Image: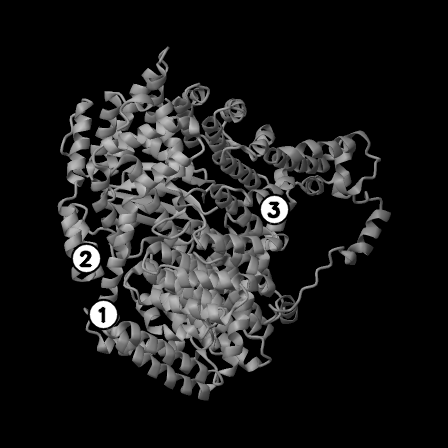
Amino acid sequence: MGSQGGFYQSKEFLDLVKSIGEARSKAEEDRIVLNEIETLKRRISEPDIPKRKMKEYIIRLVYIEMLGHDASFGYIHAVKMTHDDSLLVKRTGYLAVTLFLNEDHDLIILIVNTIQKDLKSDNYLVVCAALNAVCKLINEETIPAVLPQVMELLAHPKEAVRKKAIMALHRFYQKSPSSVSHLVSNFRKRLCDNDPGVMGATLCPLFELIARDVNSYKDLVISFVSILKQVAERRLSKAYDYHQMPAPFIQIKLLKILALLGSGDKQASENMYTVVGDIFRKCDSSSNIGNAVLYECICCVSSIYPNPKLLESAADVISRFLKSDSHNLKYMGIDALGRLIKISPEIAEQHQLAVIDCLEDPDDTLKRKTFELLYKMTKSTNVEVIVDRMIDYMISINDNHYKTEIASRCVELAEQFAPSNQWFIQTMNRVFEHAGDLVNIKVAHNLMRLIAEGFGEDDDNADTKLRSSAVESYLRILGEPKLPSVFLQVICWVLGEYGTADGMFSASDITGKLCDVAEAYSNDETVKAYATTALMKIYAFEIAARRKVDMLPECQSLMEELLASHSTDLQQRAYELQAVIGLDAHAVACIMPSDASCEDIEVDRDLSFLNDYIQEAIEKGAQPYIPESERSGMLNISNFRNQDHHEASSHGLRFEAYELPKPAVQSRIPQTLIASTEIVPVPEPMYPRESYQTTMPSIPSDAGSAELKLRLEGVQKKWGRSTYTPATSTSNSTSQKTVNGTSQGDGASTVSSMRETYDSRKPQVEVSHEKQKLAASLFGGSSKTEKSPATGHKAAKASSHVVKSHVPKSSLEVASEKATPAQQPPDLLDLGEPTATSTALQLDPFKQLEGLLDATEVASAVNGAPAASRSPDIMALYADTAAGIHNKNDADLLSGLSNPSVTNMPGTTAMPQVTQSSSKGPNPKDSLEKDALVRQMGVNPSSQNPNLFKDLLG
Amino acid sequence: MGIRFILMVNKQGQTRLAQYYEWLTLEERRALEGEIVRKCLARNEQQCSFVEHRNYKIVYRRYASLFFLVGVDNDENELAILEFIHLLVETMDRHFGNVCELDIMFHLEKAHFMLEEMVMNGCIVETSKANILTPVQLLEKTS
C-alpha cells in the first residue's frame, strides 16, 4: 500500500527503515542513525532536489530526531517545505516543523507568513494543515498575527475547519488568556454547532474555562444535560459509536463538565440526576469503555450535590469493580471508592477485604492507589496502622519522587491525627530517618515548633514529658550511622533546647553527643552550625543555673577549629559561644533565657530606640540619613559608599529587566525621571522594585488562578478534618467494641464469599484471619454508635448482593457464557461497518470528491477480501477487551488469541470459536503479502525481526 | 491539558512514533522515554495498565510487539485513555488493513496525520474513524 502517488518511497528509504527496524540494540541503531545524519547532511543541501525526494529526506530527519539525535541541520528545509504548493508535501512540512521546533524557535518567524497565507486558502485541507501548525507553533507574541483569520474560520462551511479553529482559539487561551478574553463567548456559540465533532471539540476549551470560573457558566447546565441526554440516547451519528457505546469520549467529557458545575450546587445538580441515573442503567458494564463511562459517572456523582439513589448505583459499580479479576478495574474501583467515601464514609467498610488485598498486591500501581485511598480515610482511630504501613512502604521503595510524596503525607496525617505525643515523635523519627533529605524543610521546622509549643493543651507536664521522650529518642538515634541532614538539625536543636531540661542527662552527656555530631558530619555546615548553637545553649543554661562549666576537651578542639573556619557563619557562632561562656550568670540568663523559643520577639522596625543617639550625632555635625530610594539621584555628589550602593541596585534592575523585556521599557521611564529631575517627589515608582510591581499587572489572571488553586487546597483540607474529626470524637471505647463486633461478622461473611471469587489458588485461611485483623484495625472504629445499625443493614445488603452474584460459581460461568454470545452480534455489526462507512463517506458533503472516495472503496475491496480477513482480528479484539488484558504471548499468534479467553473463562462456547477463527485467520498470510510487497520494492526482507510484520490487532 | 505525550515503542524499547503535546528538549525526551519504557516493559500482563510516573500517569497497552504509551495528567480517566489507544489502533487498522509495526514505520507521517486529527492541544477532539481518515485519504488521492 501507499507505494504509489504522493507516498512514493525510494529503495533507500525502505532500506533505512528496515535496518532501523531490524536493529538489535540501541548501539546498532545509533550507528545507523549517525550514518544517516552524514548522508543527509551531504544530500539535503544539493541543488534541485525533487519535491518527493525532499519530502522523504524530511521524514528521515523526523526519524533521526525521534531516535534521539539532533537533526537541526535540516530544520530550514522543513520550513521551506511548508511553502510548497503540493498539499501532501506542505502538510509533511508542517508536521516536521511542529515536531522539530518549539514556539520560541527563531525559525518560527519564517513560518508565520506561510501560515497566514494558508489560512486564507480555498482548499480546506490546506487550512486544516495550517491550523494544526497554529496550535503548536504560535506563541503569545504571534497570536495577533493569526487571530483575525482564525476568528473568521470559526464560521467556515467545513466542520473540520471549524473544529480546528476552535482548538486554535483554545490554544491562544491557554497561551495568553488575556489576549482572547473578549472572544471566549465563541466557545459557547460553537457548543451549538450542527456538527457533533465541532461540539465535541468545543467541550475541551469549555471544560478549562469552567474549571477556572464555574459561576459564569451555570446557565449552560441545562444545555450540557440535554446534550448528554441526546448522546446517551444515540442521537449522534453512528460514526461516533465505539464498541456499541454512543460517543463515549464525548459522554465522559460532558460528565467531567457536569461534575464541575454541580459541585456544591444543589439546584444545578438536581438537573443532572435523571441523565446520570439513565447512563448508570444503560451502560454496558462488560466492556472497558462502558466501565470508563461508569467510572466517570461515579466521579460526577461524588462531586455534585449528593443524591441517595445515585450514590447507591455508584456503590454498586464500585463493588463490581473491586470484585473484578482485572487489575485495571480494581484500580478504578479503589480510586472511585476514594471519591465516594468523602460523601458516604460507611461504604468503605463493605470493601475492607478487597482493599486489603489491593494493598498487599505485588502490583505497585495498585498498591499506591490503595495508599492514596487509605490516606483519604485516615482518622484518629486508624492513623497508627495506616501511617505505620505507609512508612514501611516508603522505606521499601527507591523512587524519590513518590518517597517524598508519601513522606509528606505521613507527616500530614501524623500532625493531624496523632493519638499520643509519644507516637508522634516516634513516627516523625522514622520518617526523618528514612526520608529526611526528601521532606520539605518546613516539616522539620514544624516538628521543632510542635515540640517547643507542645500540643496546645495547657498541660505543662505533658509537654515536658514529650520533650524528654524526644530527647531520649534522639540520643538513641544518634548512634545510627548515617542520618539525613535535616533530621540532624532537628536533633541538635532539640538537644540544645531541652537536652538538660529535665535533669536526666548531664551537660557533659549532651555536649559530648553534640560534638560527636559536629565531627561525624564535618562536611555539613548547617548541621555544624546547629550543633554549635546547641552547645552554646547548653553552656548558657549551665551558667545561668550557676553550675560549674567544664568544657570537654573535644568541645574545645571543635571550637578552635571553628574559630578558624572558612565559613563566617560558623566562625561567628564559635566567637559568640566563647563570649557567652565568659559572661556572668545574670547576663547569660538575659541573653539566653531557658525555654524561650516560643516567646514572641518584638522587632522595632523604626529602630526608635536609636533616636537619641542619632540626634546626638547630627548635632555633632553628622550627615543625615538619606533613604535608599532617593540616593540614586545623588550619584554625582555622593561618596564612595553611596555609589557602590547605587551600582548594586542598578545591576539588580538590569538583570531583572532582561528576564522580563516588557516591563523594562516602562521601568526606564521613571529612571530617566529620576536622572533628569531629582526634585520630582515621585516616591513609589522611583524605587526600581516598586516600579516592577506597577508594571506587571499584565498577568492578573495568573494571580487569579493561583488564588483559585489556593482555595481548592483549602477545601480539601477542610473536608479532611471536618469529615473525620467528629467521627473520632464520638467513637468512644464502647462504641468501638460494638462496631468491631459487627464489622468482624460482616468481614467473615465477605471472606467466605471472597475466598471463592478471589482465590482459587491461594490457600489462605490463616492469612485471611490476619487480614481480618488488619481490616478491623483499618476500618474498625469508622462508624458511630448511632450509625451502626444502619451500616449493619447496609453490610448485610451488600453481602447478600455478594452471594447473589458470586457464590454460585457456576452461575458466574453461565453469566459469562451469556455475555460472550451477547458480544458476538456486535462483531457482525462491526463487520458490516466498512460498508456503512463508505456510505457515510458518500453522504459526506464533499461531493466533488465522490469519485475519489469510490475508488478508495474499490481499492480496499480489491485489496484482498477485507471482510473475511478482518473478522478474526475483531473477534480477537473483543476477547481482549472482555478480559481486560492484553495478549500474553506475542511470539505465538494462536496462543495470543487463546490466552485471554482462558483467563476470562468464557466457557465452552467461546473457545472453539476463537481457535477456529484464528486457524483460518489470514494474519500470517497478510504478513507474507506485505513481505512480498517489500520484496517487490526491492528490499530484501531478512527474517531477523519477524515482529515487524505482526498484526497489531492479531 | 489531559494528554501530554503519545509514544509507540517496541519490545526492545525502540521508539517507533513520538508525539509530545508540551515542549521537551531532545535530551529530556530521551531521558523520559528511557525511563518510562523501562518501567512499563518490566510489568507483567496481570498488572494494571497504568503506571504513575512523577506527577503524571502513563497508560499503556501492548499490541503484538508494539507498546502504545500515553502520558496523561492525574485527573484523566485511565480506562478511557486505554480505550482511546484501542481506537487509534482500530483506526490505523482500518486504514492499513491488518496494521503492523512496519506499516507505522513506512508511513510514519500518515500515522502522525491520524494523530493530528484525533488529538489537539492534548485533548481528544475526534473519535469518529471516518472523520479521522477522510483527510488522510484525500491527501493520498490528491497528490
Marks 1 and 3, how far apart in space? 52 Å
Mark closest to the chain's N terminus, 1 or 3: 3
How many dots with numbers? Answer: 3
Q: Amino acid at mark 1?
A: Asp
Q: Nearer the viewer, residue B107 or A586?
A: B107
Residue A312 drawn at (x, y percent) = 44, 71
| Chain letter, disc 2 residue | A
Instruction: Let me know if marks 1 and 3 both belong to one chain.
Output: yes
Amino acid type of the residue tagged 2 in the rendering: Ala
Residue A81 visible in this rendered orientation of the protein: yes
What residue does disc 1 label? A759
Residue plotted at (51% across, 52% down): A227
Give the SS element for disc 2: helix
Callout 3: SS: helix
Name the residue that disc number 2 marks: A910
How busy is the neighbourhood of tag 2: few (under 14 within 10 Å), some, or many (20 plus)? Answer: many
Marks 3/2: CA–CA distance:
57 Å
> In front of the other: label 3 or label 2?
2
Answer with left or right where residue A556 lies relative to residue A34.
right
Mark 3 or 2 closer to N-term? 3
Q: Position of residue A927 (x, y in %)?
A: 18, 36
From this view, report whether residue A138 is shown above or below residue A89.
below
**Residue that label 3 marks:** A702
The reply to whether discs 2 and 1 touch (Cβ–Cβ < 8 Å) is no
Labels 2 and 1 share a subunit: yes
Marks 2, 1: nearer the viewer: 2
Q: Residue at x 49, y 66 (%)?
A: A412
In the image, residue A11 lies at what x, y percent? Answer: 23, 21
